Image: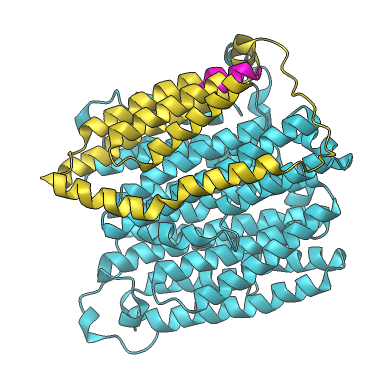
Chain colours: A cyan, B yellow
Amino acid sequence: MSDLLLLVPFVAVVLLYLLPKRARAAGLWIAFGILALEAAAAALDRFATIDVGLLAPLEKLLGFHLATDGLSGLLILCTGLVGMAALLVARRTLESVNERFLFANLVLVAVVGINGIAMVRDLFSLYVFVEVTAVATFILIAAGRGDHVFEGAWKYIFLSVVASVLMLTSLGFFLLSTGGITLDAARTGLEANAPLAWIAMALFLCGLFVKGAMVPFHGWLADAYTAAPAPVSVFMAGVVTKASGIFALLRIAQSTLGGATPGREILLVVGAVTIVGGAFLALTQTNFKRMLAYSSISQMGYIVLALGGDLHLGILAAGLHFFNHAISKSQLFANAAAIEQQLGTLDMDEMGGLGARMPVTAGTSAVASLSIAGLPPLAGFWSKLLIVLALWNAKEYAFAAVAILASLVTLAYFLSLQRKVFFGKPLNKWSGAREASAGLLVPAVVLALITIALGVGFPFALRILMGGGA
Amino acid sequence: MIGFTLLLVVLVLAALWASMTTTLLRATLGLALASALLSVVMFSMGATLAAVMELSVCAGLISVVLVSVASLTRPRSIQEEIASRRSRLRRIWPLPLVLIAAGVALSFVHAPVDIVLRLPQSDGDVRTVLWSMRQLDLFGQILILLAGALGVLVLFRKEAKDDD
C-alpha cells in the first residue's frame, strides 16, 4: 500500500491530462476521491494489511520499498482530510473549470511530495520530497491574483532556496562524517559525538526551521498565507508547512536525536521563542488571514517545544498537536474564505456583527479558535496538556510555564478576532452579507466536528494512540 | 595547480557575470558557463556523480528551460534597459569587491582544522548509483520536473489572460 501513496496521485496527474477538455470538471472530484481513500486507509490503519505480497512485483520493478508507521499515518491522515477540505473550498472560490483543474493537479503533486516526506528514512530523499512539495506550493501561491501574490510567492521560494542550501550543505557534512545519509547513519554520527555530524545536524535543523517558519526564520509565512488564494491557504496552513518543516523535525527527533541533550535544548529554545514571538505578532494584526498566519507560527512552536520534552510523551504530544492544529487552522482558513466571499475584504477593523448574518461560520470559527487556545473539552486542550506534561516530566519547568502563559495570549488574540468579526451590532454596510454557500460550510462543519469529537472522546483516542505506538 | 586556480577564477567571473548582467539571455549563458566549469572542477576532484548531475541538470536542462522562458518574455526598451542597468550596478557593485576581499583574506588564513574528513562511500559507478541505489530520488526529480511543467501552464496562461 505504501508505494501506492506515491504512485496513485502521480499516475492520476498524468492521466487527468488525457481527459477531454469538457470532462476536466471531474478532475477535482477524482483528486477528492484519491484523498478520501488516502485518509480512510490512514484512519483505519490499512497500509500494512495491503502491503503483504500484493505489491511485490511492482516494488521489484520500481526498485524502492517504502513503509509507514504511526507518524507517517498521522501526516497522511492530515493530508487526506485537509486536502479534501481545500478541494471543496476551491470548488466554490476558484472561478473557472480550468483553474480548478490545475489546482487539483498541483495538489496531487504536492500530496506525492508530502506522502514521500511521511515515509522516507533517508535525509537526501527527505530533502528531495520537501523540494517537490515546495515547488508545487510555490506555483499554487503564484497562481493567485493581485500585486501581493508575487511578493508572497517570491518570499516563499527565496527562503525555500536558503533552506535547501543549508540542507544540502548538511548532507555533504553527514557524508563526510558518517559515510551515509540515512537517519540511522546520522544517529550513529551523533551518538559518537562527531563534531562534524553535530554541525551537519545543526545546519539541517536550521533548514527545517526555515521551512517550518520558526522564529527568527518566519518572515515568509505571513505574506505567503495572505497572498495565496483561499484554497491554497487552507492546504498550506493545514499540511504543507507542517509536512515540510515540522514533520521532518518530528521524524528526526524520533529517529535520530533521541534524548541527546544539545538537540533537545535547541528544540526547546527555538520552540519557546517561536510560541511567544508568533503569539505577540498575531495579537497586533488586523487582517484575518494574517492573524491566522502568525497564530500558525506560534502553534508550530508548541509542536517543536514538545519535542524538547520527555522523549516518548513529547512525540505523542507533538503528533497530537500537529493533527489538532492541522484540522483547526485549515478550518479557520475555510472560514476566512467564506467571509472574504461575502464581504470582499479580510480587514477585521471593517467587520462587526457578522455572527448574526453568518451563524454557522461564526460557530465553527469559535470551536476552532477555542480549541487552538487550549480550552477544555476541545481537542486542543488535550494536546496542550500533554505538551505541558512532557515538559514537566523532563523537568523543564520554565518552558512548561511559557507554554501555559502563551496559551493566554492565544486566547486573547482569538477572542479579539471573534469580537471584531462576529460580535456586536451588525454593520449596515454588510446588510447584504449572507451565510456562505454549502460548499464552503461543509468542510468547516466537518472539521469542527472532528475537533469536538476528538476532544470529547479523547480518552478512547489516547488508548488507540498509545496502543498503536504513535 | 595554476590551471585549477585559473578554472576557479573563470568560474567566479562567469557567476558574477550571470548575477550582474541585465539581460536574461546573457545571465542564462553565464549560469550555464559557471555550471559547466563547476562540473569540470568536480570531475577533477573525483566527484563523478556530482559532476554528471551538475552538467546534465544545471548546465543542460535548466539552461534549456531558462532560455525557453526568456524567449517568451517581452524585450525591454532601451530606456528601461539603461535605467535597470544603473539601478542594478548601484545595488550590486560591492559584490565582486566583497568576493575578492574574502578570497584574499581566506588565502592568508591557515587555521588548524582538527576534523578528520572521511571520503563518502561511493562504490559503484554513476549508473549503479542512479538506477540501483537512488531510484526514489530519481522519482522525486521527475516529480519536480512535472511540477515545473504545470507551473509553466499555470503561470503563462495567467500571463496571457492578463495581457488580454
- Residue A259, percent across and down? 85, 51
Instruction: Residue A299: name its quadrant.
Output: bottom right
Is residue A340 shown above or below B163? below
- Residue A381, percent across and down? 66, 69
- The residue closer to the viewer here, A136 or B58, is B58
- Residue A387 is left or right of residue A117, and the answer is right
- Seen at 65% across and 10% down, the residue is B125
- Residue A328, percent across and down? 53, 62
- Seen at 67% across and 35% down, the residue is A171
Residue A46 visible from this viewpoint: no
In this view, the residue farthest toward the bottom is A425
**What range of the chain is rendered magenta?**
B41-54
- Residue A38 is left or right of residue A170, and the answer is left
Instruction: Residue A29: name its quadrant.
Output: top left
- Seen at 83% across and 41% down, the residue is A190
- Residue A223 is left or right of residue B110, and the answer is left
Please identify the quadrant where the N terminus of chain A is shown.
top right
- Seen at 55% across and 40% down, the residue is A130
Disc tally is 0
- The residue closer to the viewer here, A318 or A297, is A297
Instruction: Residue A345: name its quadrant.
Output: bottom left
Is residue B6 shown above or below B161? above
Is most of the magenta stretch helix, strand or loop? helix
- The residue closer to the viewer here, B19 or A33, is B19
- The residue closer to the viewer here, B32 or B133, is B32
Q: Is residue A52 magenta?
A: no
Residue A84 visible from this viewpoint: yes
- Residue B6, percent across and down? 54, 25
